[in-house]
C-alpha cells in the first residue's frame, strides 16, 4: 500500500507527460466524466462545452487535470488509513462508520426550506459559527432550476441554497473562486459520493494555494444516481406541463420522483420512468452512501416525518455532529432502518453491464469457458466483490462460482485478497493470453511440420510423384522455404 507521502509526491509531480488528451481518452470520451468541475477549476486552459470539459488552449501536460479527476487513481486503502485510523470498523456495503443515527434540525426556519430534516444546513451553519470553516462549496440553481456552483460564506447564504437539486452540478467549479476571489482558508464541501474522491485528493495536497482552499469538512449525500438537466426540460416541463419557475422542491421517496409546486400541489413519477435521464457515468459508480465523507446524510432509513438518516464516519464529523446536538441545534433518534440503507447500497454495488455476444465469440480461441468470461466481466463491472455478492448477481451455486474464481485466479485474470476478488486490467490479461496463444500456435506449427508434414510428404512422393507436373514441383519447393 502506498503511504500518504507517496500519494502527495504523485500529486505534486509535473513531469509525467500526461495531459488533457489522456483525460479525454480515458475518462471523457468513455462517458465516465462525472462533471464535478475539478479539472476546469484547477486549469485555466480547460473550459466547458455541452456539459463536458474541453481544452481551450495549448496543453502543457502538467498532468493536474488527470491526477485530480474523480475517475482516475484514488488510493482507497491509503485514504481509509488516513481518515479512519485503522480503528473504525468497515462495512462492505456502506463503508467505515462510527455511528448511524436519525437527526433533525430544531430550527423551524431551516426545516421550512431544507430537504427532510435539515441536517446538512444545520451542520454547515454550526461549522461556520464555530470557526471550523469560513466558506462552503455548494450547488445552487437559478429560477429555472439550472444548476450552478457557488461559494457561500454566511448562514443566510446557506439557507438560500438549502434543498436538493437532483441535477448534476460541477460544484468544484467554484473552488478557484474560493481561493482567488474570496481568499477562504477553511472550506466545506457538500456533494455526491463520486465528487468526494476529487475533493479528498485536493484536500491531501491543494494545488492552487498553500494558504487558501483547504477542506476542513466534507459532507456526502446518499446517491442512487443523478440526472442531467433533460429531466427538468423533458419530464417536468414537457410531460407534466409544469413551468420550472413554479417548482418549489424536488424529492425522491418510496420509489417516486416528486415535484412540489409553489401553489401547494405535487406530482409523482415512478423512478423507473426517470432512469433515461440518468447522468451517463452514474452507471459505473458503486458508492451509495458517500463512503469517504466525514458525515453522510440521506433520507433512506429515516423515521417518518422530517428526519434524516446520518452516517458519522470520521472524528471530525463526529465532533461537529455531537457539538451541534449538545448545542441543541439538532435532536436525534436511534430508530434508523439500517437494512433499508444497506439494501439500496447493495443495489448500487451490484450493478453490472452485460457483455455483447461478440466478446464471447472473439475469446473462444483462448480456451476459456463462457462462464469464466462472464465471471471476469462481472468483476470488471463490480470492481471488487466477495462470494456472497457474486452469488447474488450471478444467481449460481456458490460452489460453481468458487471453482470458476479459482480457475481465473490461476490464469491470473483475477486476484484474491481477504476473501474479495478484483479483476486484473484486461489490457494485461488479453496481452498475456495472446502471447500464450501465439506461443502455442508456433509450437503446434513446429510439431505439425516435424511430426506430420514429413511423413505425409514422404508417403505422397512414394505414391504420387509421377503425377506431379514440374510447375507444381517448383511450387512445392517454394512452400517448404516459406514454412
Image (tube, rainbow, N blue to C red):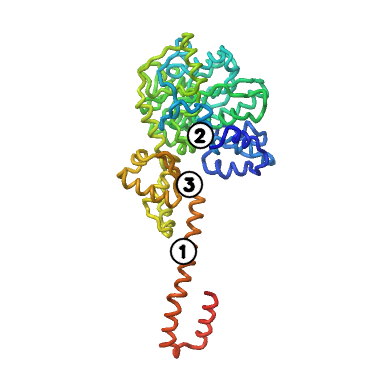
Q: Residues within 10 Å of mark 3 (few under 14, many from 20)?
A: some
How far across and down, in percent of the image, does residue 411 sit? Answer: 43, 52
Image coords of residue 337 (percent x, y): 35, 23
Q: Secondary structure at mark 3?
A: loop
Reading the image, the residue beneath label 3 is 424
Residue 472 % position (x, y): 50, 84
Q: Residue at x 44, y 89 (%)?
A: 467
Asked if marks 3 and 1 touch (Cβ < 8 Å), the reply is: no
- The answer to whether residue 141 is visible is no
Give the residue displayed 67% in from the left and 27% down from the top: 209
Indicate the quadrant where residue 139 lies.
top right
Q: CA distance from mark 2 to mark 3?
A: 17 Å
Q: Quadrant of residue 236?
A: top left
Q: Which residue is mark 1?
A: 440
Tell me how far mark 2 sits from mark 1, CA to CA. Answer: 39 Å
Mark 3 or mark 1, earlier in chain: 3
Relative side of 210 to 266, left or right: right
In which quadrant of the rendered view does residue 135 lie?
top right
Q: Determine the secondary structure under disc 1.
A: helix
Could you classify mark 2 by the number of other residues whose Cα lies within 10 Å: few (under 14), some (14-19), or many (20 or more)?
few
Determine the residue located farthest toward the left in the rendered image.
397
Q: Which residue is mark 2?
A: 77
Q: Which one is in front in this view, the residue at disc 2 or the one at disc 3?
A: 2
Vertical position of residue 341 compared to residue 105: above or below: below
- Image vertical order of residue 81 relative to residue 434, above or below: above
Quick one: which residue is furthest to the bottom in this view? 466
Q: Earlier in the sequence, mark 2 or mark 3?
A: 2
Q: Is disc 1 surrounded by few (<14), some (14 to 19) or many (20+) residues within 10 Å?
A: few
Q: Is residue 98 visible?
A: yes
The CA span between labels 3 and 1 is 23 Å
Q: Secondary structure at mark 2?
A: helix
Amino acid at each position: 500500500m502506498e503511504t500518504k507521502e507517496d500519494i502527495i509526491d504523485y500529486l505534486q509531480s509535473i513531469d509525467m507527460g500526461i495531459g488533457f488528451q489522456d483525460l479525454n481518452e480515458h475518462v471523457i470520451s468513455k462517458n465516465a466524466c462525472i462533471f464535478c468541475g475539478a479539472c476546469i477549476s484547477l486549469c485555466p486552459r480547460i473550459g466547458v462545452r455541452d456539459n463536458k470539459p474541453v481544452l481551450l488552449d495549448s496543453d502543457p501536460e502538467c498532468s493536474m487535470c488527470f491526477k485530480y479527476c474523480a475517475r482516475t487513481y484514488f488510493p482507497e486503502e491509503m485514504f481509509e488509513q488516513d481518515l479512519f485510523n485503522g480503528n473504525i470498523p468497515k462495512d462492505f456495503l456502506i463503508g467505515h462508520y462510527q455511528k448511524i443515527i436519525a437527526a433533525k434540525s430544531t430550527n423551524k426556519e431551516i426545516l421550512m426550506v431544507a430537504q427532510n430534516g435539515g441536517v446538512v444546513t444545520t451542520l454547515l451553519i454550526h461549522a461556520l459559527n464555530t470557526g471550523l470553516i469560513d466558506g462552503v462549496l455548494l450547488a445552487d440553481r437559478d429560477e429555472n432550476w439550472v444548476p450552478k456552483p457557488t461559494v457561500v460564506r454566511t448562514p443566510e447564504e446557506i439557507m438560500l441554497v438549502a434543498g436538493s437539486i437532483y441535477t448534476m452540478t460541477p460544484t468544484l467549479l467554484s473552488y478557484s473562486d474560493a481561493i482567488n476571489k474570496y481568499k477562504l482558508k477553511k472550506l466545506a464541501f457538500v456533494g455526491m459520493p463520486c465528487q468526494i474522491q476529487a475533493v479528498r485528493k485536493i484536500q491531501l495536497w491543494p494545488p492552487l494555494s498553500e494558504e487558501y482552499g483547504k477542506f476542513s469538512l466534507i459532507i456526502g449525500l446518499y446517491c442512487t444516481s443523478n440526472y442531467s438537466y433533460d429531466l427538468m426540460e423533458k419530464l417536468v416541463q414537457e410531460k407534466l406541463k409544469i413551468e420550472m419557475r413554479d417548482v418549489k422542491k424536488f424529492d425522491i421517496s418510496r420509489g417516486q420522483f416528486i415535484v412540489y409546486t409553489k401553489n401547494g400541489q405535487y406530482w409523482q413519477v415512478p423512478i423507473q420512468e426517470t432512469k433515461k435521464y440518468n447522468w451517463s457515468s452514474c452507471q459505473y459508480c458503486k458508492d451509495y452512501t458517500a463512503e469517504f465523507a466525514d458525515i453522510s446524510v440521506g433520507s433512506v432509513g429515516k423515521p417518518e416525518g422530517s428526519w434524516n438518516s446520518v452516517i458519522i464516519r470520521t472524528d471530525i464529523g463526529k465532533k461537529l455532529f455531537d457539538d451541534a446536538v449538545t448545542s441543541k441545534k439538532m435532536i436525534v433518534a436511534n430508530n434508523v432502518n439500517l437494512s433499508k440503507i444497506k439494501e439500496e447500497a447493495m443495489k448500487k454495488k451490484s450493478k453490472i453491464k452485460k457483455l455483447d455476444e461478440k466478446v464471447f465469440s472473439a475469446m473462444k480461441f483462448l480456451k476459456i469457458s463462457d462462464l469464466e468470461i462472464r465471471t471476469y466481466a462481472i468483476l470488471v463491472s463490480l470492481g471488487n466483490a466477495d462470494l456472497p455478492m457474486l452469488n447474488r448477481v450471478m444467481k449460481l451455486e456458490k460452489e460453481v462460482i468458487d471453482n470458476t474464481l479459482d480457475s481465473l485466479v490461476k490464469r491470473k485474470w483475477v486476484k484474491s485478497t481477504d476473501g474479495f476478488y478484483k479483476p486484473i486490467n484486461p489490457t494485461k490479461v488479453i496481452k498475456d493470453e495472446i502471447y500464450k496463444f501465439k506461443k502455442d500456435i508456433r509450437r503446434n506449427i513446429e510439431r505439425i511440420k516435424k511430426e506430420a508434414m514429413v511423413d505425409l510428404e514422404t508417403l505422397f512422393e512414394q505414391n504420387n510423384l509421377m503425377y506431379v507436373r514440374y510447375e507444381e514441383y517448383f511450387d512445392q519447393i517454394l512452400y517448404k522455404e516459406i514454412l
